[in-house]
Image (cartoon, rainbow, N blue to C red):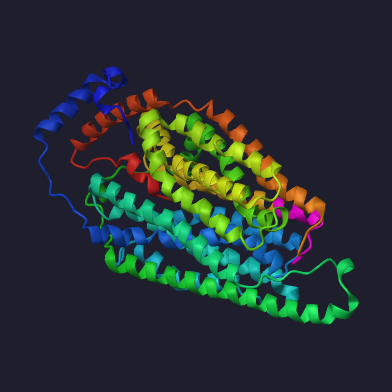
Amino acid sequence: MAKGEGSESGSAAGLLSPSILQAGERQAQVKEPKKKQQLSVCNKLCYAVGGAPYQVTGCALGFFLQIYLLDVALVDPFSASIILFVGRAWDAFTDPLVGFCISKSSWTRLGRLMPWIIFSTPLAVVAYFLIWFVPDFPRGQALWYLIFYCLFETLVTCFHVPYSALTMFISTEQSERDSATAYRMTVEVLGTVLGTAIQGQIVGQANAPCLQDPSDSALASESSNRTHSISSLRQTQNAYLLAAGVIGSIYVVCAVILTLGVRERREPCETQQAEPVPFFRGLRLVMSHGPYVKLIAAFLFTSLAFMLVEGNFALFCTYTLGFRNEFQNLLLAIMLSATFTIPLWQWFLTRFGKKTAVYIGISSAVPFLILVALIESNLIITYVVAVAAGISVAAAFLLPWSMLPDVIDDFHLKHPHSHGTEPIFFSFYVFFTKFASGVSMGISTLSLDFAGYRSRGCSQPARVKFTLKMLVALTPITLILLGLLLFKLYPIDEEKRRQNKKALQALRDEASSSGCSDTDSTELASIL
């Protein structure tokens, strides 16, 4: 996604010795054309469909699990905060762990990555369905949800980590990999819309039960109200199970299409690759690389802001704004807006630079978050805010994965003999983001408990409404501003990026003269 290639100066040539540049010229003269491994459109579509299960299930859990635990499963807020925190923290730890286990796997007739995808799928679907099932034993409910939430996160990681790494094994041609990745990103964004639409619309059709304040209820009608409430609660529980069944079916269908339509190819020069740096030494090098530390610190704050909005938006719409029957449509408006504006941000960052896209894209959410905190319940304005928030969500979704390869390129120039560190960059970015997400969701649910949250209440105390407003508006705004301040310290601008690109290309040309080219770090943007 670099720009200005035709106008690049030779400033980066000074980073390399004349022998490297001359070797690159010699190699270009003797290089023989190789037969390209073309991927058909069908192959690319089958590969792209494999990205949908992670996004569909993740979006449904991210938006709906908190309100499900509190108002449908009737888990107390303190236990719900433990479930959300431990589940997401466990999910964070499983990413590098599963990546390490996959790296130690041997090749089979199906490949090295495909067996993980095939065997994890049925178990993941069962675990996902049981997350949305309300057991009959109320004493052990919290443990039930904690076990199956952690189990599902482990199994979906066993699916998604090898699927992400599969990018490097569907073709040896960079152009084909890039094209397949473009198909994948399109399907993944559509998957977030699909997850929001299926879960929201099915659950929204149920008669969401609530309990009036006991002080306002007449004693004579207490029995009939309780009977109606139990019946309505059962309808809502069945609606969540139906949505889980539909999403689970989509998960299986996508996994089957991926397995049948994609063949994992072994790298022809895999055995000739340089010995990778030991894990802990590589981790120490990565964590001491200044641009990486500054980038993940900045994105950590901005990601936390959007995660707080995501996790508490349903409760905010239901109790603070009073749109109990509209929140699923508001969520759908956010995701549709994000889907349609991702191509716009892709064009913007190639035209004006990635740092400019960060400042404009992420900061654009601030005035609308202020607006939603200040206005009274106004449905039209809330929809406008939802669409505007989707524009910022698109920028927050796209930019981290666009900027991490630039950091890796910079690292390779400073540590040219440190091979195999790319998975560390991506897996630990995901680790920090997921762990912080667990902390934020645990703290926010615990805050609602301290504020006096009443499960299934038709209304909430003023302190709960104020707490939700802080969690959806003031706290995210503060985190966004802190993240943008940290971006001022990020050193890789467009000029630096062009210099690194030119220097690395000369290094790769020199390395390819030995018969086996090094892996382009920008191709590894989808690994882990």
Q: Does the image show residue 394?
A: yes
**What's the residue at 68%, 58% (across, down)?**
318
Q: Horizontal placement of 330 versus 170: left or right?
A: right
Relative height, residue 260 to residue 464 (above, below): below
Q: Nearer the viewer, residue 280 or 265?
A: 265
Q: Quadrant of the N terminus?
A: top left
Q: Horizontal placement of 146 versus 251: left or right?
A: right
**What's the residue at 60%, 56% (across, down)?**
88
**Magenta stretch?**
444-457
Residue 509: image x %, image y %? 22, 33
Q: Does the image show residue 96?
A: no
**What's the residue at 80%, 81% (across, down)?**
224
Q: Nearer the viewer, residue 239 or 100?
A: 239
Q: Nearer the viewer, residue 513 or 473?
A: 473
Residue 462: image x %, image y %? 81, 52
Q: Horizontal placement of 37 versus 480: left or right?
A: left
User: How many marks overall?
Assistant: 0
Q: Nearer the viewer, residue 59 or 401?
A: 59
Q: Quadrant of residue 136?
A: bottom right
Does residue 432 show up magenta in the picture?
no
Residue 496: image x %, image y %? 38, 24
Residue 145: image x %, image y %? 64, 68
Does residue 456 show up magenta in the picture?
yes
Relative height, residue 446 to residue 403 (above, below): below
Relative height, residue 487 to residue 378 (above, below): above
